[in-house]
Amino acid sequence: MVQKSDFRRVDEYIWELPKDFRDDMRVPARLFGDAELFDAAFRDRTVEQLINTTTLPGIVKHAMAMPDFHQGYGFPIGGVAAMRMDTGVISPGGVGYDINCGVRLLGTHLEREEVAPSLRDLTAALYRACPSGVGGKGRVHVSGRELDELVTQGAKWALKRRLAWPEDLAHTEESGCLPGANPSEVSARAKERGRPQVGSLGAGNHFIEIDVVDEIYDPETAEVFGLWEGQVVVQIHCGSRGFGHQVCDDYVKKLQPVVEKYGIQLPDRELVCAPIDSPEGRSYYGAMACAVNYAFVNRQVLVMGVREAFEQVLAGKVKNFDLFQVYGVTHNIAKFEEHEVDGRRMKLCVHRKGATRAFPPGHPGVPEDYRDVGQPVLVPGSMGTASYVLVGTHKAMELTFGSTCHGAGRVMSRRKARKRIQGSELRHELEEQGIVVRAGSMRGLAEEAPAAYKDVSRVVEVVHGAGLARKVARLRPMAVIKG
Amino acid sequence: MKGRFEEVEHTADIAIRVWGRDMAELFANAAYGMACQLADPDEVVRTVQRLVELEAYDAETLLVAWLGELLYLSERDGCVFTDFDVLELTPTRLRASARGGPANDRRHYIKAVTFSSLEIVHTGEGYETTIVFDV
């Protein structure tokens, strides 16, 4: 059993487990956190899962866990691992089932006071315009042929269908389209599940939130992002729905015998993988990219739903009800990126599982109008608490392949949360704080209670302190919609 | 012999430990354990029957495929399956029937059945395994 004393503190916020700790480790493991978060890593299987991640072929530098880490399956949540293109592997278990789960942030031209009188109507309109819940059908239905185009072109498809504004694309990671998508690598079942769900939120931890910007830490950067104190903004958190789940499920099963074929030894079958440069690896990448693009379109269609709801409720009441896209990030993905390893620039396959890209100023991957300041990083907190807008840094490029945290991170199981917290009471508490809540299920609400999560502010202080991103603004919820 | 299944702690997802006197019972109990995460089985009026036939690489992959198939049918038909008859089972092949029906009060949406540390273990009393569901 791994102990805290096996780790070496290399920096105030970095804890390293040397690679000689276990025979099968190929690189050291690094946890990011303050002393208290570090302690929390030993209360579930986070560390064991992180050590398992270090055993993957072709991994460089370290396997890392961002400070919102917790136990997942395969990789821990918060896991970041980069593999060499020639000898490395790509792992569906290192991306997860909700491929390209991510967050959009929309800015309004409205102050809190302008929205407050219509908040209940607005929340109800959002709930209607953005379908949610188990088996929820989406806003858009597509044919089989249209779906192939959708998953190949991503947000460009949405633009053609007038389901996006041109400026939305520029303000989305990868401009809303990951290249290399190959629909012929996607099963008929994934397509069948995906067709009716375009533009749906789903259930679980997915949400839409109306927030107010309540504190600005970096006024210059906030201005570049179009954010100001007192402004109403909207967050959307969801992923690739049944399409993405099925793609991952198909490949985790399909690659089981492949591991043996390539002589790869794995400590956990969920880490199943294939060499990047192999027919099986290329096949998974082509299918995963389709799911990534599906999720980009899914969120984009929901953005239009949010715009529709704002227009319905606020037209005639306020001067300008338009919402502009601040940015869209992705959380669960494997991408080919260039990074520096031991002084050499290398193309790597970076896996981020419950981690956000955080590219620095000057990086060509950052939208032109943000390039002087860096990429916006969106960190939603647990329901009813704060969320943060951060900005990417050069230090993140050096330390974490340009990655940072993606949220608060759970600390309590759903079972415990249900035992301790009543959904209806929680809703009452949130309403007492002036937060309007619409939820598909009270049980689901209880499981997502703030007490089940780490304190997002603490997590953000760590990434800010460690230099993995810099604080720009804090958001407070006004209304929450959960599936 | 313990019960059919029990829920075990997992920080973010759902994990169940399942027992069976033989592999067929393990597969049926795993499916029942999953159904209990989706809805209250006592509330489900069984009006639908589906026959499932699957082949897989090994017993663990077959178990994941079986539960995944039920999740798919559950999403497609708007049902939760609660009763199972395993008609034929080898480590790589399964034929089973599942009965279920619509459930009004859904408990969870399960995204997928994972292979996380998945291993079917032969014990003195039969078989045991722990399954993690991504929710």
Image: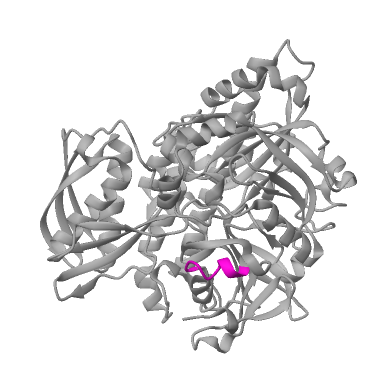
Q: Residue at x 19, y 57 (%)?
A: B4
Where is residue B22? Give x, y as percent: 12, 66
Image label count: 0
**Foreground of the two, A430 or A342:** A430
Left or right of residue B128, residue A54 in this image: right
> Farthest residue in the left direction?
B87
**Magenta segment range?**
A38-45
Q: Is residue A482 visible?
A: no
**Foreground of the two, B59 or A30:** A30
Q: Residue at x 32, y 61 (%)?
A: B131
Left or right of residue B28, residue A95 in this image: right
Please state, as top left, top right, bottom left or bottom right, where the N terminus of chain B lies in the image. Answer: bottom left
Where is residue B101? Give x, y as percent: 21, 35
Tell me, yes or no, whether the highlighted magenta stretch contains residue A39. yes
Tell me, yes or no, whether the highlighted magenta stretch contains residue A482. no
Q: How is the image coloured?
A: one colour
Q: Relative to A22, does residue A403 appear above or below in the rendering?
A: above
Left or right of residue A370, residue A75 in this image: left
**Foreground of the two, B108 or A246:** B108
Q: Relative to B55, does residue B75 appear above or below in the rendering?
A: above
Where is residue B78? Give x, y as percent: 30, 34
Q: Which is the main secondary structure of the residues drawn in magenta? A: loop
